[in-house]
Amino acid sequence: MKNRYRVLIVMIIMCCFVTPVFASGAAEDDGKITIKYNNFSAGETNAAVLQEMIALFEAENPNITIENEAMGYGDNYWTQLVTRIAGNDAPDCFELNMENFLAHATRGSLRPLDSLFADTDLDKSVYSSGLLEAVSFDGELQAIPLMFSTVVLVYNMDLFDRAGVAYPTKDWTWEDSLAAAKKISALGDDTWGMFNPIQFWEFYKVSQQNGGGLMTPDGKTLTINSKANVETLQYMLDRIDVHHVMPSMEELADRPESDLFVEGKLGMWLNGVWAFNDLQLRADFPWGVEVEPGNLSKATHFFGNVGCVSKTTKHPEAAFKFLNFLASNPKAVDLRLDAQWELPTVSDPAIMQRYIADTPPENKIAVVNSLDYAVKPPALEQFAELTNIVNTKIEMAREGLLSAQDALDQAQKEAEAQITL
Amino acid sequence: MYTGTVKQNRRAVIFFLFPAVAALVVFFLLPIGESVIMSLLDYDPLKGFSAIKFVGLENFKRLYTTKDLAIQFRHVLYYMVLYIPLVLMTSMSQALMLNKDFAGKKLYKILFYLPVISSWVAVALIWKWLLNGKYGLINNWLMIIGIQGPSWIRSQVWAMPGVVLAAVWKDTGYYALILLAALKGIDKNYYEAARIDGAGAWQRFKSITMPLISPTLFLLVIINVINGFQVFESIYIMTEGGPAGATRVPVEQIYRNAFTYYNMGYASALAWALAIVIFSVTVVQFSFQKKWVTYEG
């Protein structure tokens, strides 16, 4: 009998070695708080910057320790986060991009922050109002905007000079950019006028430049195969198939567009401000940026990363304080600007002035001007499904398997069957 | 020599088995059981437990209306038809070669096993370049013999064969090792007797080697069919299911539903449907084994 107990005790001890895997929650002793911050955008490039921000925060708040759970974007960040939330082991605060923010917000999985602003001495008016609106859902602030970026038309000034074309202006339309692209493409065999990928996100934005969109403004009806959208997709395809100003996937042959641009083989390229660091290091020719050309109207991409407080954290105030520090503390903002880690979300014009003055690119004000035309993805619970349906059909059109009309007709039919509005 | 009593023996067995059994129960059996329950629920992990709804067999009924699923099973069959014969042929030839003595055999053994221990991310990176339509080594070689190679993973038709080539390169060493062990287990006297009777190399291979390693080959076919139905990692890393969905497979659908659409219930139903298909195919394979598998003695 005694021996049986001994075996039982050994088993229990062995279980204890296994169970820490399931342990969760912040460690606490003597009023000290530990906050877990799960994040992805720092990556390798800005890991040291984030660590410096954390050190500054901890110096100012000696009772709070930040556990930096930094992961790469591709390291199953979203999967592990969802699993942890589902398993009631959510980090105290975490970073989301806009797309995933909407997925969380529409499902009510975030802690609303208005009451935390009301309960603390923190002031939300330090943030740009447009960004605050972007992180609100159902009339409540759901996240702290940490950083943002816009997508602009990046152009190689040398290629424009060689082709004898005037540099883009903010009034440029599709027609102007296509005319310039044709002249630049004529400069050489593997020289291309422009590159805008043919996929969902691009289509979603470009269709709005043409007066189209995926849904009616009230969000009650899908309009994927509207006349304006079909025209838009046809225009996107024609740039490859008819005008030959953009490489097909085969002609691109897995070369990153950034390489094509840096090698002086690409005249115009749509990209976000996150690409500037790389281009500053590698491009040995003058380059500038401008607001993306539109057609009937302008529409530009806006991306942002936000900080969310977990619904289950025991320390919402501390997590909230930390996220605000990352987003708006002057020292943290300086660090972000120095590292060019996207753009700070504070509304202080002096800060933006400092950013704009740091060139290249030429005409950096376009980064800010692009915000005026920013379009947001629809706040739809099944947005990921919609993305998949439309993207697959657009890719089939790109591969020449379907016409623009057929691709969007099929997408409309499938979306109507699967998406609940 | 073992001297313990039966009682002590039982205790030792329990003691040593406990960690493995505990891990099996916690990490495999419980989640499997949980997935059965989950397949009957409408469960969105972001909405939490309070929003869970019991939907009965609704998730399974949805499988019939998911048009893409049939297409994805077709893709997986295409993958298996290409992959299984090719990997068995290459690993068999490797095993036969390694069963002979030659200079530099030790070094060769290490080199041919290296792809097996390499991560899929690294393998995909190398093969994406090898298969590059414009600058890839494969197409350059094809060019030498006058063939204009396709754009491989950028092509609807050639993307899957491209993934298969990479997978065969990566897996050959593993299966060759299993076949080598089977070859080593064949009694040399059989070959000796056949030689005396005047049997040639091909005849010896056909009449001795193949029948005697057929149980191992059967095992490899079973393993490969099971793995084939579950193929995901290689495809997801190399093509992300593209171009235009040409390499989408059922496990990707499970992953997408669980972690992109947050439809855990439907994803679990999909996983169970896949498990049933795999089980059925394996049962059919076992029923046909008598026709070609020879068990010694």
Image: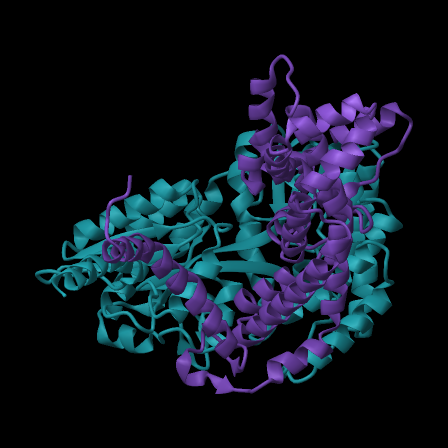
B59 relative position to A166: left or right: left
Chain A drawing hue: cyan
Tell me which corner region of the image, top left, top right, bottom left or bottom right, holds residue A226. bottom right
Tell me which corner region of the image, top left, top right, bottom left or bottom right, holds residue A349. bottom left
Where residue B13 appears, as percent x and y from the top left, is 31, 54
A418 or A170: nearer the eye?
A: A418
Q: Is residue A378 visible?
A: no
Where residue A390 appears, as percent x and y from the top left, is 72, 67
A418 or B49: nearer the eye?
A: B49
Q: Which of the chains is purple?
A: B
Q: Is residue A60 visible?
A: yes
B247 relative position to B55: left or right: right
Please tell me which residue is depicted at 78% across the width and 51% down the height of the picture. Answer: B81
Position of residue A121 relative to residue B2, above or below, is: below
Tell me which corner region of the image, top left, top right, bottom left or bottom right, holds residue B129. top right
> For the C terminus of chain A, which image quadrant?
bottom right
A265 or B289: nearer the eye?
A: B289
Please tell me which residue is depicted at 82% across the width and 53% down the height of the picture. Answer: A399
A170 relative position to B56: left or right: right
Where residue A312 appears, as percent x and y from the top left, is 31, 72
Which residue appears farthest toward the left when viewing the image? A30
A355 or B227: nearer the eye?
A: B227
B94 relative position to B56: left or right: right
